[in-house]
Image (cartoon, rainbow, N blue to C red):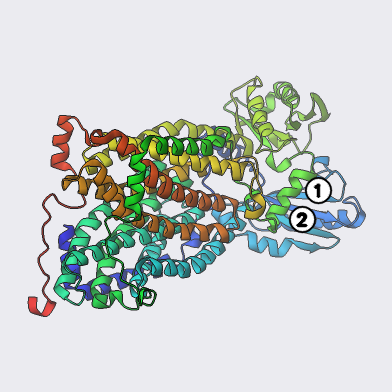
Amino acid sequence: MLARIGRAVAARPKAFLLAVIGFVVLSGAVGAGVVGKLSNGGFEDPAAASSVAREALADDFGVRAPNLVLLARSGKSVDDPAASRDGAALAARLAREPGIEQVASYWTSGKRPELRDGEGSTALVLAHIGGDETQAAKRIDGLRAEFAGAQGSLDVKLGGSVAAAQDTEKAAQEDLMAMERIAFPVLFVVLTLVFGSLVAALLPILMTIPVVLGVLLLLRVMAEFMDVSVVALNATTIVGLGLAIDYSLFVVSRYREELRERGGDVTDRAVRSEAIVASVRTAGRTVLFSALTVMLSLAALAVFPLPFLRSIAVAGIGVALFAALAAIVVVPTLLALFGAKINSLDLRRALRRGRPAKATGDEHGFWHRTATFVMRFPLPVAASAVVALLVLGSPFLGVRFSLPDDRQLPASSQSRQVGEALRTDFGSRESDAITVVATGIGDGRAKSAEIAAYARELSKVEGVASVSSYAGVHVRGERTAPPGPATAAAASRAGAYLKVVPSVETYSDSGERLVDDVRAVDAPWPVKLTGAGPALADTKQSLGDHLPLVLGFIAVAMFVLLFLFTGSVVLPLKALVLNVLSLSATFGAMVWIFQDGNLSGPLDFTATGALTAVAPILMFCLLFGLSMDYEVFMLSRIKEAHDAGADDTEAVASGLQRTGGLVTSAAALMGVVTVAGLFTSTIAFQKMFALGLTLALLIDALVVRGLLLPAFMRLMGPVNWWAPGPLRRLHGRFGIAEGPAAPERAAPVAPLARTR
């Protein structure tokens, strides 16, 4: 099939070019409005107890957690007459806004002390913006224009969870555009150094256009059927750019190799056509196989119930498929159209002037010598590299997980400033309250005594500032306020709920212990907890419950694919072990940098003492696929040499010589994209994602593929290719290889007019 595609493209490149242009126009037109369709949330399990309790609280009691915070600062005291007048007017105006519910402020709620800071100069106005997360986020800009800034004698800043999500979305869009402005020129320079020719360097850049626009089209279609995270836009764009560049590099390099094998006459159209067909048939098969490994690794994310991860799984599968199709259709089309001009504007000619030309395709170059050296001392090299990777990975043993909050944003963000004030200036955290919900217990209003006893016990838990319920307000086991209008709605015919206000940071060790301690208090009826703290606990539990299945799926899928590619059961096991070593080193570095706060100054982020819970899982699935990507390219050439009769040592050295520079160039090009993402991102989560990808690519291309791969293959010798008899026969029937056992010579492709 691939050979037929190659022949069709070589014969009718203009027709394929028109088809590609049509796809680009369609994708650009449909995908242009994708940003407005993306979701800001998706980090929680919809079936978790905290999610169920949140829905019950809204449906049965009409109560929703505050997601909007106005931080009002007075030049004097918040109890000053002018501040009291302006604060009450501010709350009243906010309450009249359409879709704004449950407005509570220091001035209109009995001057509750938890709504005022310790100095008495700042007070809070809390509210809930109706609608889902995306709809609520669209209100932020208008509300900020109306209510932030000078409000009489008060200076007001607008924050809260929805504002932080909206600020994150806007920052992500700006970061993506900045990354593309930097990445494309640098990619062109690096590609020029790799290919020498300006025209050849232009091919991979042109190939990225349908891939990037295809990403927008895919996300736009997905948004009609499911929640798609705004993070998916940046993540899939970075991955799509990297894969497109890598795959085009492999196809173009194979095309040039096929030209050399046919005499190198680039002016002969028949020779060029043969080379195109051969490169699509050989490198194209490996590209498709490589894309399949990436797709399967990302597909594992769909096992998790979090909408955030599921949207990236679907989008990632589509991106890998787009990149592979572009490599076997768009790149050959451009090769056929450029024809003899592919090597035009070769900048290396000036550098070679006056010097003898370097032999092309040197079989005993740098990578051959490196592999030979490593295989002379395989045990010391392997032991040293393994120890180094384990040392780098050791910080991961102390990893802690959390959910993203406003601290992901830069310090200049208004929602970040509001969040910092809530954490440092207020003794209790009213906006992070834990709500205990009891439904199906009969009329809660008839159970005042039981509610009072339960509230009293909850208020004794360390880390609890106060407990509000139908029975009044309790602090440290004592009732400090009787039942009244403010607490009357906490019980109804549907049941009852109690609001536990913490005095500790929610996303901290103390906050996690508080959730466990509240759940451990004996309740008179079955209860469920909701709020930021319980959501974090349930998310971590959900991820942990599904992780073994995800790891098993990836391991089995990669083992089967590599077996079909190599016919060995040893090489897939080796690849899995090396990948785990490589990724453990990357994750250890992420803990040392982003959790422990090392390099927080140079990288300009705030360490929270934990990693975003979904980040290592997302990076693991993506990096596992990319690592297998490089493994496939290298093993394909090693196996090709081995099948041609080379012994194990020569097959490894020859395969590494043919692919070492290519894989390193591919990693460098992918690194250009990730480094550009690192230095243009203002969001800590995206900085970690970009730096993690960069480190993993360096470790994988240099340490794993350059040192550990040849060392392990030398140590295992002929055992590398072992498989039981039945599996050998299975591979003989269904196996995959880059080149056929008996290479067929592609028939010359006649010019279109002659064919007619």
At which x and y percent is residue 481? 82, 32
- Nearest to N terminus: mark 1 or mark 2: 2
At which x and y percent is residue 366? 35, 55
**Residue with the mark numbered 2:** 92
Q: Determine the image quadrant of residue 373.
A: top left
Instruction: Mark yes or no: residue 377 visible.
Output: yes
**Residue with the mark numbered 1:** 108
Instruction: Mark yes or no: residue 491 visible.
Output: no
Report the residue at 70% width, 65% height from top: 145
Pointers 1 and 2 in contact (CB under 8 A)? yes
Q: Amino acid at mark 2?
A: Ala
Report the residue at 37% width, 65% height from top: 194
Q: CA distance from mark 1 to mark 2?
A: 9 Å
Report the residue at 24% width, 41% height from top: 648
Q: Determine the image quadrant of residue 451.
A: top right
Q: Secondary structure at mark 1?
A: loop
Return the residue found at the far bottom: 753
The residue closer to the viewer here, 449 or 608, is 608
Q: Secondary structure at mark 2?
A: helix
The residue closer to the viewer here, 585 or 172, is 585
Number of residues whose C-alpha sits closer than 10 Å to that of mark 2, classed few (under 14), some (14–19) or many (20 or more) = some
Number of residues whose C-alpha sits closer than 10 Å to that of mark 1, classed few (under 14), some (14–19) or many (20 or more) = some
Q: Determine the image quadrant of residue 470.
A: top right
At which x and y percent is residue 206? 36, 70
Q: Amino acid at mark 1?
A: Thr
Quadrant of the snapshot with the N terminus: bottom left
Report the residue at 82% width, 55% height from top: 73
The residue closer to the viewer here, 541 or 572, is 572
Q: Is residue 608 left or right of residue 255?
A: right
Quadrant of the snapshot with the C terminus: bottom left
